[in-house]
Image (spheres, coloured by chain):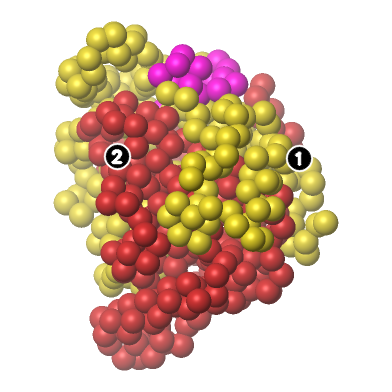
Chain colours: A yellow, B red
Amino acid sequence: MSPEFALSPEQRRGVYAAIYGRRDVRHFRPDPVPPSVLARLLDAAHHAPSVGFMQPWDFILIADRALRARVHELFLAERARAAETFPEPRRSQYLAYKLEGILDAPLNVCVTCDLARGGVVLGRRSMPDTDVYSACLAIQNFWLAARAEGVGVGWVSILCPDQLSALLGLPPTVVPVAYLCVGYPEAFADRPLLEATGWRERLSLDRLVHYERWGGTPTGDWAAVAAAVCERAPFEPPRGGDCAPSPA
Amino acid sequence: MSPEFALSPEQRRGVYAAIYGRRDVRHFRPDPVPPSVLARLLDAAHHAPSVGFMQPWDFILIADRALRARVHELFLAERARAAETFPEPRRSQYLAYKLEGILDAPLNVCVTCDLARGGVVLGRRSMPDTDVYSACLAIQNFWLAARAEGVGVGWVSILCPDQLSALLGLPPTVVPVAYLCVGYPEAFADRPLLEATGWRERLSLDRLVHYERWGGTPTGDWAAVAAAVCERAPFEPPRGGDCAPSPA
């Protein structure tokens, strides 16, 4: 069945290929991303949904090596602080991971959220954080468009937001949401680094799906959905984790 | 040029078609989403990036009409409260908008974030909200995969999170991030409702791109990027807003 507004099978395959093939990239080639490609990624991000059409995002493009070196210093300091939260042998494993490509990638992009953009925003009263959520949706658009273009993106969250804001000169109402390393990757790995190296396992999807309420089991018509969640659908790649019955 | 890992042109076109053709849908047909399609959307969401591979999301699937009626009552109460924040004529315009499809859509999905999943999470110390950010990235995967399948999604943010948590029986460490209406749409509009009806304009992308620091202008090599941001790239549809020079 192909509903009226579905994309063609090959285009649909492209969407799933971007979703499943996307990785957090930390190993980059030095080749620059062409301006036309970068513009497409930014425009894709700009077409994310946003609460009340707020469009609270901005994009700071950073190539200057001295500036990136300062960001990298902030990263190293935060990484050292974070290492203390892990007991051995996790601490050593954590410190051995390459978790960023700030200096390797030819481009860094800071995506921000302007908390005050446009005054009173429709739909934001009950859930005020939907402004930052909107910026996250833009980031995922950027990430998936990048994967489609063969461009790698890595998100560095091991940075102190206040230090980053000061370094980039952000106004008081603007917060950094993501600091991204962007460039052509050496490879797109089959699996996330933390999965492949045994830091954490991929959870089994069926344990994350609830029916009608938290912890609700798939009774009645839901049984067919629960079965489909456990089957391999046409556009799906193999996935980690056996599908087990939902916990009672 | 087609870099080594880029998707094929047709697959790439699919990614951009999903990004540009996605809408916040409020008018649904009653036909159910087949289990195999729903499973693909959930699995796409589950393959979003997450901080420290935390995978903090859960998905509560809701079809029960009585339950949806209670959510709809919560929506109406919040909408009434929010209406007071707009002076006329905006208040009447706000109240005239159809902002949800809770009862029309055959399926509602609440996407949550478990703030305590898996203990200490790698990469979350400096930016603790990256757990909720991860859930947002999963939501955008779901939304784009849905667009590819011809399925509409509408995000209802006019709900009190505490009331929703109580209604769905969420544990204390789990917060609702999005309440989604899901089903086959009557149409995918060309433009967002709030843009088409003059509530807000789409911002011009070039005003949202900064170079090297907040407010930085495109000097040197950045001139080519700034020009590309203003040009129509091959995969782009027409966009609203003329491209104007960046403010000084």
Magenta span: A180-199
Magenta highlight: main SS: loop
Near mark 2 (Cα within 10 A), the count class, few <14, some 14-19 or many ≥20, is: some
Label 2 sits on residue: B116
Q: Chain of mark 1?
A: A
Percent of width and height locating residue B16: 64, 48
Is residue A115 located in the magenta-colored stretch of the structure?
A: no
The amino acid type found where label 1 is placed reads Pro
Closer-to-camera residue (B127/B168): B168
Instruction: Report x, y in % for residue A175.
Output: 25, 47
Which quarter of the figure has residue B28?
Answer: bottom right
Q: Is residue B129 visible?
A: yes
The residue drawn where x is 37% and y is 59% is B169
Circle on res. A234:
1
- Indicate the quadrant where residue B210 lies: top left
The residue at 34%/32% (across/down) is B118
